C-alpha cells in the first residue's frame, strides 16, 4: 500500500510483470491509498522492483506552477515543489511518512532554456534524445532521506559560487543580490560542523525562490530553498540560513519519526542555529535571539490561545492535517526546553557534547521523544537527580507557555525594552519627546525586538503609531521582519492609512509567517474585513496551494 493524492495511476508492474492495482477511498487531506496486488508469493527478505506509471494533477498540493508574470524575469514559467509535511504523495506514490528513509535517482526532461535542480547531487545534463528542444538533468541522492525531503525546481535559473561547496541559484534578476546576502554561508557551515560533526551531504547549495514560496526556508538536502523576503540588503536575516544548515544534522540526518514529534527536528535545529550565531556574533547575541524566540512563542500562544492543544510540545495529530497544526511552538517551545536543560546540566560546552552524541547515535534513523529522553538520561547518568526535577509532563503534554522560563542575558535587549516601555507609557502630550535619534544605536535585530515587544502590548493608540511613522518612517523600511511587525502594529491600532500597505505585503509575497497574521489582523479590523476577503479572492489563484488553504480558513472563506 502506497500513499497518493490527486495522482492518476495508469499502470503498475512488479519485476517487469504488469499487475493489478486499486485506488481506495479518498481520505480527506491524506489522499487515496494505492493498493498493489503482487503477482507472485514473496519470500522474507526478497527484493522486488515496483514500477508505477502515473501523472500528477494541476491542483497537486505539493507543486506550484507559476506563470511567466509571477517570476522576476517575466519570460518563462517556473515550477517548485514543497513536500513537507505530507505532500510528497501528491507528486509520486510513496510511503509518505518520516519514519521511512530512501535514496533516490532521477532524470528530469525540461525545455532547453530552463534548468532543473533537485535535493540531490547534480550528475550532469545532456540533450533529450527524443526532443531537440529539451535537456535532461540527472540527479542522485545517496544518503537515505524521508520522502518529505524530495524536491524539484524548474526555472530560468543562474548560479554564483559563494563558497567551496556552495552555489546560490536564483533568477538572473536576483542572483547577485542573493550572492551578497548569503556570503557568510561557508563560515556558518564550518561552525556547524565544529558543533555537530561532519557534513555528510557533499554540496550545500541555496536556491532563492519566487515570492509565493510559503516558508522562510526549506532544508531540502544539497539544495536549501529560501524565500526572497530574506534579501534585506544587510545580511541581517541570514539566521534563516544558519537554521537550514543546522537541519543537515537535526531533521535530515536524525528525523522525527512522526509529525507529533516535530519539535525533535525544529527545537534542536533552532538550538544549533543560535549556537552558530553565538560563535559568529558573540554569546550576548545568542541570548538576544533566544529571548526574541521566547517573545515569538508568547505571540503565537496569544494567537492560538493558551489552552489550544496545538500549543503542546507533543500535540495529538490524530486526524489532523499537520499544515493546520503548524506554528512556532515546536521551534520555540522546543528550543526553550533545550536552553533550560543547557542551563541546569552544566552550560553550553557540556550540552553541545550531548547534542553531538545524540546526532551520532540516531544518524540515518528516525526517533520519537522517548528515544531522545532515554538517551538524555543515559548521557547524563551522573545528573539523574537534576533531570528528575524537570517537570517533563508539563513541558511535553500541557498547552500554553512552558512551566519554567530560562535565564537570558539582557545586554542587547535592554535598549529595546526601555524604548518600547517609553512608547507604551507615553501620553499624547509626551509624543513630541520622540525623535529619529531614538533608533540611531539600534541594529536591525533590535528594531525587530522593539516592535515585537510593542506587539505583545498591542493595540497602541492610533496617535502613537502616527507619531512613530513621523519620526521613524517605518513605512519605507524594506527589511521584511521589521515591516511585518510594523504593519501589524498599525492595523491592531486601527490606523486606516495602513490598510493598503498591509494588503500589499500580505499579497506581494506568500510566506505563511507574514501572510497569515496580516490577513487575520485585517479580517479582525472591521474597516478592512471586506477588503481582506475580496483581496484574498482576487489573489488566491496566484498563491501557493497550502497558503491559500490556510488563509481561506483564517478568513472563514468557503473552499468548495
Image (tube, rainbow, N blue to C red):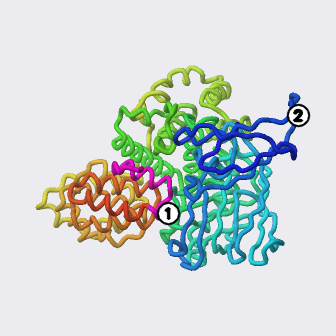
Q: Is residue 97 visible?
A: no
Secondary element at tag 2:
loop
Query: Which of the two marks, 1 or 2, is nearer to us in this view?
Result: 2
What residue sits right under mark 2 in the picture?
46
Quadrant in the rendering for residue 50: top right
Quadrant in the rendering for residue 19: top right
In this view of the protein, which residue sits in the foreground, 500 or 274? 500
Secondary element at tag 1:
loop
In terms of secondary structure, what is the magenta stretch mainly?
A: helix
Query: How would you rate the neighbour count of disc 1 (Cα within 10 Å): few for under 14, some for 14-19, many for 20 or more?
Result: many
Q: Position of residue 301 (x, y in %)?
A: 37, 40
Q: Identify the residue shown where x is 57% and y is 59%.
A: 58
As measured in the structure, the alpha-carbon distance from the residue carrying label 1 to the one carrying label 2 is 45 Å
545 magenta-colored: yes
Query: How would you rate the neighbour count of disc 2 (Cα within 10 Å): few for under 14, some for 14-19, many for 20 or more?
Result: few
Q: Identify the residue shown where x is 45% and y is 62%.
A: 541
537 magenta-colored: no
Q: Is residue 151 above or below residue 321?
A: below
Report the disc number at residue 513: none
Q: Identify the residue shown where x is 48% and y is 68%.
A: 232
Q: Position of residue 519 (x, y in %)?
A: 35, 56
Whichever of labels 1 and 2 marks the residue nearer the N terminus, that label is 2
The answer to whether marks 1 and 2 mark residues whose Cβ atoms lie closer than 8 Å is no
In the image, taking residue 182 as reference, residue 287 lies left or right, namely: left
Q: Position of residue 280 (x, y in %)?
A: 58, 57
Q: Find the magenta span and give its range.
A: 541-560
What residue sits right under mark 1 in the picture?
212
In this view of the protein, which residue sits in the foreground, 466 or 292? 466
In the image, taking residue 91 as reference, residue 326 lies left or right, namely: left
Residue placed farthest to the left in the image? Answer: 429
Quarter of the image with the N terminus in it: top right
Q: What is the tally of numbered marks visible in this picture?
A: 2
Amino acid at each position: 500500500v502506497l500513499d497518493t493524492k490527486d495522482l492518476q495511476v495508469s499502470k503498475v508492474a512488479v519485476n517487469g510483470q504488469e499487475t493489478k492495482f486499486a485506488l481506495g477511498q479518498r481520505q480527506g487531506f491524506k489522499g487515496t491509498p494505492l493498493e498493489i496486488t503482487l503477482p507472485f508469493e514473496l519470500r522474507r527478505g526478497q527484493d522486488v522492483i515496483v514500477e508505477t506509471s502515473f501523472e500528477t494533477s494541476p491542483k497537486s498540493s505539493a507543486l506550484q506552477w507559476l506563470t511567466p508574470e509571477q517570476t522576476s524575469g517575466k519570460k518563462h514559467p517556473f515550477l517548485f515543489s514543497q513536500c513537507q509535511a505530507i505532500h510528497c504523495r501528491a507528486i509520486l506514490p510513496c510511503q509518505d511518512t518520516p519514519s521511512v528513509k530512501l535514496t533516490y535517482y532521477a532524470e528530469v526532461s525540461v525545455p532547453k532554456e530552463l534548468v532543473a535542480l533537485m535535493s540531490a547531487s547534480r550528475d550532469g545534463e545532456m540533450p533529450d534524445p527524443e526532443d531537440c528542444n529539451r535537456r535532461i538533468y540527472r540527479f542522485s541522492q545517496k544518503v537515505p532521506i524521508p520522502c518529505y525531503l524530495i524536491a524539484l525546481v524548474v526555472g530560468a535559473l543562474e548560479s554564483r559560487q559563494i563558497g567551496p561547496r556552495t552555489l546560490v541559484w536564483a533568477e538572473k534578476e536576483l542572483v547577485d543580490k542573493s550572492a551578497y546576502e548569503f556570503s557568510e554561508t561557508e563560515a556558518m557551515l564550518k561552525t556547524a560542523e565544529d558543533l555537530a560533526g561532519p557534513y555528510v551531504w557533499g554540496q550545500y547549495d541555496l536556491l532563492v525562490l519566487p515570492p509565493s514560496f510559503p516558508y522562510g526556508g526549506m532544508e531540502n538536502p544539497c539544495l536549501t530553498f529560501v524565500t526572497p523576503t530574506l534579501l534585506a540588503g544587510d545580511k541581517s536575516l541570514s539566521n534563516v540560513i544558519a537554521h537550514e544548515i543546522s537541519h543537515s544534522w537535526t531533521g535530515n540526518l536524525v528525523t522525527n519519526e512522526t509529525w507529533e514529534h516535530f519539535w525533535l527536528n525544529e527545537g534542536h535545529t533552532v538550538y544549533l542555529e543560535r549556537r552558530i550565531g553565538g560563535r559568529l556574533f558573540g554569546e550576548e547575541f545568542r541570548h538576544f535571539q533566544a529571548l526574541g524566540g521566547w517573545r515569538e512563542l508568547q505571540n503565537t500562544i496569544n494567537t492560538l490561545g493558551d489552552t489550544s492543544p496545538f500549543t503542546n510540545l507533543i500535540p495529538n495529530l490524530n486526524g489532523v492535517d499537520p499544515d493546520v497544526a503548524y506554528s512556532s511552538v515546536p521551534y520555540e517551545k522546543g528550543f526553550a526546553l533545550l536552553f533550560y536543560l543547557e542551563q541546569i546540566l552544566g552550560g553550553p560546552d557540556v550540552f553541545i557534547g550531548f547534542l553531538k552524541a545524540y546526532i551520532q547515535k540516531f544518524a540515518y534513523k528516525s526517533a520519537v521523544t522517548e528515544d531522545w529522553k532515554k538517551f538524555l538520561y543515559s548521557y547524563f547518568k551522573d545528573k539523574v537527580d537534576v533531570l528528575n526535577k524537570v517537570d517533563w509532563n508539563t513541558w511535553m503534554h500541557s498547552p500554553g507557555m512552558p512551566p519554567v522560563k530560562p535565564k537570558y542575558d539582557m545586554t542587547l535587549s535592554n535598549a529595546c525594552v526601555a524604548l518600547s516601555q517609553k512608547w507604551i507609557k507615553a501620553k499624547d502630550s509626551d509624543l513630541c519627546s520622540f525623535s529619529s535619534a531614538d533608533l540611531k544605536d539600534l541594529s536591525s535585530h533590535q528594531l525587530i525586538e522593539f516592535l515585537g515587544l510593542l506587539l505583545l502590548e498591542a493595540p497602541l493608540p492610533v496617535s502613537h503609531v502616527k507619531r512613530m511613522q513621523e519620526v521613524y518612517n517605518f513605512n519605507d523600511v524594506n527589511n521584511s521582519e521589521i515591516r511585518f511587525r510594523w504593519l501589524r502594529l498599525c492595523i491592531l491600532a486601527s490606523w486606516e492609512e495602513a490598510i493598503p500597505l498591509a494588503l500589499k505585503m500580505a499579497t506581494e509575497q506568500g510566506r505563511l509567517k507574514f501572510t497569515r497574521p496580516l490577513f487575520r489582523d485585517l479580517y479582525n479590523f472591521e474597516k478592512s474585513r471586506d477588503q481582506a476577503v475580496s483581496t484574498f479572492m482576487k489573489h488566491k489563484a496566484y498563491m501557493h496551494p497550502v497558503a491559500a488553504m490556510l488563509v481561506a480558513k483564517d478568513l472563514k472563506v468557503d473552499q468548495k
